[in-house]
Image (spheres, grey):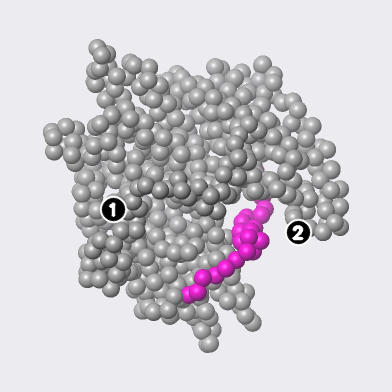
């Protein structure tokens, strides 16, 4: 079976495609965008937004039914069997979990993003694989792209099926293509009669791909007369002739995930199944990912809440050297970090979700910042929980239960959460994407000045425009309300943190300006510098969310109001330490030395350092030989988890 040839793309071509596909306009205000420009627009997030009473009531009503179902599911079964039992999937479908955000007019639950996040937190607490099953289906699978860009006919045809339990998957990544969409090799060639497209290609890491009934496939349409061409999105029936699921992949975590390698050979897709226009595929994918990234924050928040519970219970009952371990400072510091960060995670999650529902702010940067920060903090919290529990943290829940102890799956959560720093954009790619968005105003004002390919005429013209922009903007970064002791006094003990955020929003904007002057066109290659600027912004965003949430809880008279203020205060103190460290590292670092050493490593200068141990990936044992045979082996063809031997679930 033929495999499409690799597509080579230059750095410039890759950049051009991403630039063409990103949302360029800012029709609505963005708190994070303004913050990166040194403007602390507190009015965009304060008062802390809350779901409407109707939305909150609808959400709670559904969550009560969902909680009853989740209490009947056993995550240890998923972990032990390495799959989600069919009866679990059927039960979720019957409750309507595959249509959480699908409008009720199409048979869905019609939940808001806020309600959807709460449902994801609850389902994921049973086993993270359930969360992935549902979120891959409706955050990036068929429902979300159709809601964004589908025709009325497409919505009427596919959304009711999705809501009823027809599982969907998203096929973008290829064996040779990760974060570089310019090199997508899968093709969608128009048929001679113009009524269909013929798909060919291989897709890797297709989450839900081994059990899906519907697929969203990204493929390249050749540019020709009558065809705009470019990377395009299609709804494809998973049982179409020519589609082969060759294997179910296995990972360090998420043992119940249905993730495979899918091959397409001369697959005919009707023209009516094209989502949007030809060439809009990547733009649709990037927009769809906003919702998917919020779901990852929900997963990390749920894990943090559970970790806090386990850490509290264990640290209070486990006694060493005459005292509960939680009273020892080394462990107490970890507990304080988990508690304070959990509060900030939930504040960031709910703030982003309700802003998404209200549709009054552009949250593309907030969603990306939240995903980046939450995935990093979620992994750190999980690791700290393992450390707090010591040997019992490293031991599996099944082994603990076999010894008669409480089956706490701490090591499982550490494994399962690790993927969130890779899912929906790795942390490294997220920093670069956010850096591009934060620099949007600068690119608009002085784009040609930092464009290596611009001619002198364009640079001269850009210089005039840039002079006007910076003459007005830069002086505003000198002073602000953060330097006024009486500012933000309505926040009480948290006022000092709000002033810190305002001051440092201006400071990071100045730092970016200095870097532009210092490195000019070379700034885009200073990825570590840009990453630190982004990380500073993520911390400032989390601090802002924590403070406005705590103030809202205190002002509303909630019994937890005082405790919320304490949590926010401690979180901000911890975050301030991280922010100061990041600022110091902007200019005092080993970036240049690291770059030089890396070149030496890649050139083989230090290859002698690798001598000694064996390389297990180069083994030739019989099990490896069998694995290398791939899909032709009986083990793969009769794999019990592949669609050929497992009934697809449909309510």
**Who is closer to the viewer here, 260 or 20?**
260
As drawn, the label of residue 256 is: 1
Binning the other alpha carbons within 10 Å of mark 2 as few (below 14), some (14 to 19) or many (20 upward) gives: few
Tell me how far mark 2 sits from mark 1, CA to CA: 49 Å
The quadrant in which residue 408 appears is top left
In x, y percent, where is residue 56?
42, 40
In x, y percent, where is residue 463?
84, 48
Q: In this view, does 14 lie to the left or right of 560?
A: right
State the SS at label 1.
loop
The quadrant in which residue 90 appears is bottom left
The residue shown at (29%, 51%) is 255
Binning the other alpha carbons within 10 Å of mark 1 as few (below 14), some (14 to 19) or many (20 upward) gives: many
The quadrant in which residue 453 appears is bottom right
- Mark 1 or mark 2, which is nearer the start of the sequence? 1
- Residue 146 visible to an observer of this rendering: no
Name above or below for residue 168 compared with residue 585: below
In the current view of this chain or complex, which residue is farthest to the top?
Answer: 322
Name above or below for residue 432 compared with residue 103: above
Q: In this view, does 24 lie to the left or right of 290?
A: right
In the rendered view of the protein, which quadrant contains the C terminus? bottom left
What span is in magenta?
4-29
In x, y percent, where is residue 202?
43, 70
Q: Which of marks 2 and 1 is in front?
A: 2
The residue shown at (39%, 79%) is 1
As drawn, the label of residue 453 is: 2
**Who is closer to the viewer here, 162 or 569?**
569
**Who is closer to the viewer here, 185 or 640?**
185
Name above or below for residue 155 compared with residue 616: below
């Amino acid at each position: 079976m033929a495999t499409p040839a690799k597509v080579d793309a230059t750095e410039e071509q890759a950049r051009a495609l991403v630039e063409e596909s990103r949302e360029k306009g800012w029709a609505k205000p963005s708190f994070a965008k303004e913050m990166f420009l040194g403007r602390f627009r507190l009015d965009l997030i304060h008062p802390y937004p809350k779901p409407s009473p109707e939305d909150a009531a609808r959400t709670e009503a559904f969550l009560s039914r969902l909680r009853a179902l989740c209490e009947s599911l056993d995550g240890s079964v998923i972990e032990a069997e390495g799959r989600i039992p069919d009866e679990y999937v059927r039960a979720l479908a019957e409750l309507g979990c595959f249509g959480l955000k699908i409008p009720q007019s199409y048979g869905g639950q019609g939940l808001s993003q806020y309600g959807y996040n709460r449902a994801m937190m609850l389902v994921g607490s049973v086993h993270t694989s359930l969360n992935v099953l549902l979120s891959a289906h409706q955050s990036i699978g068929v429902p979300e792209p159709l809601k964004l860009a589908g025709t009325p006919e497409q919505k009427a045809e596919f959304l009711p099926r999705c809501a009823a339990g027809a599982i969907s998957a998203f096929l973008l990544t290829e064996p040779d293509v990760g974060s570089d969409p310019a090199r997508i090799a899968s093709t969608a060639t128009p048929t001679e009669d113009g009524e269909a497209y013929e798909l060919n290609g291989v897709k890797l890491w297709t989450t839900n791909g081994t059990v899906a009934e519907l697929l969203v496939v990204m493929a390249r349409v050749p540019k020709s007369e009558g065809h705009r061409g470019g990377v395009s999105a299609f709804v494809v029936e998973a049982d179409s002739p020519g589609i082969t699921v060759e294997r179910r992949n296995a990972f360090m975590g998420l043992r119940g995930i249905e993730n495979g390698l899918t091959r397409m050979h001369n697959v005919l897709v009707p023209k009516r199944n094209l989502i949007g226009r030809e060439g809009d595929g990547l733009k649709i994918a990037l927009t769809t990912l906003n919702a998917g990234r919020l779901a990852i924050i929900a997963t990390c928040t749920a894990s943090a809440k559970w970790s806090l519970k386990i850490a509290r219970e264990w640290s209070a009952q486990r006694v060493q050297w005459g005292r509960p371990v939680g009273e020892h400072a080394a462990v107490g510091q970890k507990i304080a970090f988990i508690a304070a960060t959990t509060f900030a995670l939930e504040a960031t999650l709910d703030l982003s979700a309700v802003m998404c529902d209200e549709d009054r702010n552009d949250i593309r940067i907030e969603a990306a910042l939240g995903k980046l920060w939450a995935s990093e903090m979620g992994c750190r919290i999980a690791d700290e929980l393992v450390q707090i529990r010591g040997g019992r943290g490293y031991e599996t829940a099944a082994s603990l239960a076999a010894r008669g102890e409480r089956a706490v799956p701490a090591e499982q959560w550490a494994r399962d959460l690790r993927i969130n720093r890779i899912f929906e954009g790795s942390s490294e790619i997220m920093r670069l994407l956010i850096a591009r968005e934060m620099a949007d105003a600068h690119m608009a004002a002085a784009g040609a000045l930092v464009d290596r390919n611009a001619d002198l005429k364009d640079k001269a013209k850009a210089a005039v425009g840039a002079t006007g922009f910076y003459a007005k903007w830069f002086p505003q970064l000198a002073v602000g309300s953060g330097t006024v002791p009486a500012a933000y006094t309505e926040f009480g003990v948290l006022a000092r943190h709000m002033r810190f955020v305002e001051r440092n929003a201006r400071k990071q904007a100045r730092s970016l300006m200095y870097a532009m002057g210092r490195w000019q066109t070379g700034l885009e290659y200073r990825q570590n510098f840009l990453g630190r600027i982004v990380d500073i912004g993520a911390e400032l965003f989390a601090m802002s969310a924590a403070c406005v949430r705590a103030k809202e809880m205190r002002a509303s008279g909630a019994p937890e109001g005082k405790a919320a203020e304490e949590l926010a205060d401690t979180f901000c103190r911890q975050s301030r330490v991280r922010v100061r460290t990041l600022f110091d590292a902007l200019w005092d670092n080993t970036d240049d030395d690291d770059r030089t050493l890396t070149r030496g490593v890649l050139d083989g200068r230090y290859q002698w350092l690798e001598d000694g141990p064996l390389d297990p990936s180069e083994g030739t044992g019989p099990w490896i030989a069998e694995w290398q045979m791939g899909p032709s082996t009986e083990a793969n063809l009769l794999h019990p988890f592949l669609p050929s031997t497992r009934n697809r679930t449909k309510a």
